[in-house]
Amino acid sequence: MSELDKKLMQTPDLNKERLDKLKNLFPDLFTAEGKLNPDELKKIVDPDLVKETERFEFKWFGKSEAKRNAFTPGKATLVYDEERSVNPEYADGNMIIEGENLETLKCLLAGYRERIKCIYIDPPYNTGSDFVYSDRWDESREDYWEHIGVMQDGVKVDTNTTSSGRFHSYWLNMMYSRLLLARQLLKDDGVIFMSIDDNEVHHLRKICNELFGEENFITQIVWEKKYTRSNDAKYFSDNHDHILVYAKIKDCVKINLQERSEEQEEAYSNPDNHLKGNWKATPLHAKSGSNSDFIFTFKNGHKWSPPPGTFSRYSVETLNELDKNDEIYFGSDGKSVPSRKSFLSEVKAGVTPVTLWRYADVGHTHEANNELKKLELAGIFDNPKPTRLIRQIVNLVSDYDSIILDFFAGSGTSAHSIIELNREDSGNRKYILVQLPELTDEKSEARKAGYNKISDITIERNRRVIQKIEKEEAEKQPQLLESDKKPFKTGFKVYKLAKSNFPRIDFAPDPKNNEEENLALLNNYIQDKEAMFLAVIDEKNIFDEVLLKNGFMLNYSKVKEDAFSKNKVYRIKDDFKECLICMDMALDKQTLKDLESYKETIFICLERSLDTTMKWNLKHLLGDKLIAF
């Protein structure tokens, strides 16, 4: 990131990063001025200099702009909402963010890139209903909220009807830009799960093949979402949804085994008291192989060969070993077709997941509505997902301390599921939910209950989940004391997407100037605009924005360093990095001396707190460990 971009408090410029990487790999593709030469690039792509090469690709109206929207740096920030947060002292990284999700993902990019283990999204299914997502957030030209029609209590929506010639394009553009950023956030062994119906599943799979790579497609799950038949359906009763599963890097991914059901466990028994324990009979033949004429004689004289059209699963050596160790079963009468005794102690610790998810195993839409009803939120949200569905997803790919992201949060099922899962197995999974402050329908049960925005429902649901758990924990407190088990405590912080705390984001570089000239103009702008402004801004919001845009997660710890006597200097730590930071308007000379003991630690301060001499001295002392903005 350039010095100018840093001072403008922008999120990472992914286009510039890609060009920089390309330049490092292939400097011959660039001019002496450092610009990419398209003709040189064409020579690599098309050695014969053909103007256009035919290839398979998926195109639609607005695709190029959607990519530009994803890679254009953002200037917004996340502002802490203490009033709506729940037990923030126990949040430990759990967040519910109210805001447009494209710009929110940009805000998260610096601090959470390649740190998310699992993403689950349940995006709008593009059924011709109101379309509320906009990719505009440019405060220097127009107010974003005015553009998308935000009112005091919610968001005015645009309409995307099936009669529109760009019906699919609108939806594809919305998904394309957001999935581009989502991939940046995933760890190398991260996985994304996407719920979708038949209307757009084929389109979603095409864009995911492009963005994640067809080689990173894992599976397409079919979820049986209903247990009843819709006899009033015109053609077929719609009883399923799809869940597409893609990996960041498929070879790095480990899919966890599932626990065996009681029915599966009961298939194993030990009628002959074998020393290896419970077993079940499994065939000795297989559907494929090369030894169809195989004949084997067991020590009891029983001759066996594979049934017609099948092959022996085992070699002669293996069968001899199994026979020797009494691991062949000849039926209760000792004369039946022989089978292998497959011991429970020797098989995998669980079972491999399947691609058909029955409602009996992972829940259905009626169950999801009942879960809201138990929280006294009946009827306030259409088509919520059951917590058992999200729990299954999280269990398949996450560790006990993974971060799970859902940027189409809806009613907040993902957070509800993770809270309960952590309580059950003492895990420390963290969730980040993002929900647009979309206006609820004026005649809806949600509006009647006082929920003007869907994001209000997201927050309130999980507030009630935590309250319910706290009540249950309090009721069993005597037993907890006896067992030395601490009561389960959790919470979350609420953040809102907002305009940056720094007026400098309104500064527009002059395209006629070079970067050095624009940097000088920006420094003057900062000196004139920010002194009085920063003095009245909430300190936490300033810290959050500065640290988030410098690559820190929002669950950082902040401790005042007593070694500094003249300025307030804090030590910041998150799960991955640490720094020293000072937000004072001026740095004392003594602070420069104190910093001599911290040469290997990043030091962040305000640009306007440094005069020329102080800046030179700090740069000489700390080198690239100094971040002045």
Image: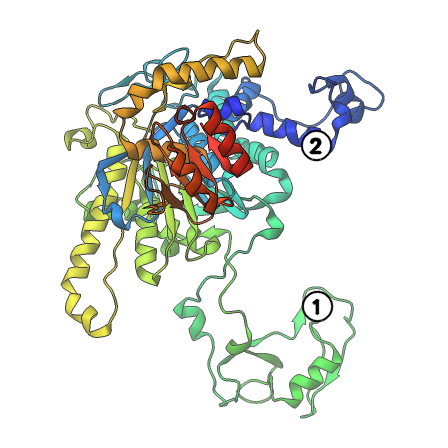
Q: Position of residue 175 (x, y in %)?
A: 48, 29
Horizontal side of residue 588 vs 218, given as left or right: left
- Going by the picture, which residue comes out furthest to the right? 48
Q: Earlier in the sequence, mark 2 or mark 1?
A: 2
Please give the residue where the numbered disc 2 appears in the rendered image. 24
Residue 310 vs 550, above or below: the answer is below
**Splitting the image into 4 quarters, where does residue 327 fall?**
bottom right
Are the residues at dot 2 and dot 1 in contact (C-beta closer than 8 Å)?
A: no
- Picture coordinates of residue 15, whole percent (x, y): 58, 25
Q: Is residue 609 left or right of residue 246?
A: left
Q: Nearer the viewer, residue 417 or 350?
A: 417
Near-viewer residue (224 or 349): 349
Label 2 vs label 1: CA separation? Answer: 57 Å
Q: Which residue corresponds to mark 1? A: 310
Q: Which secondary structure lies at badge 2? A: helix
Q: Residue at x 60, y 36 (%)?
A: 209
Q: Nearer the viewer, residue 614 or 409?
A: 614
Residue type at the position of mark 2: Asn
Residue count near mark 1 (Cα–Cα under 10 Å), binned few <14, some 14–19, many ≥20: some
Q: How is the image coloured?
A: rainbow
In the displayed image of the protein, which residue is found farthest to the bottom? 300
In the image, which is nearer the foreground, mark 2 or mark 1?
A: 2
- Looking at the picture, how far across and down is residue 191, in whole percent? 51, 46
Q: Amino acid at mark 1?
A: Thr
Tag shown at residue 344: none
Residue at the spot 72% in from the left edge and 78% down from the top edge = 305
> Would you call the spot at circle 2 few (<14 residues within 10 Å), some (14-19), or many (20 or more)?
few
Q: Where in the figure is residue 436, as x and y percent of width and height? A: 33, 29
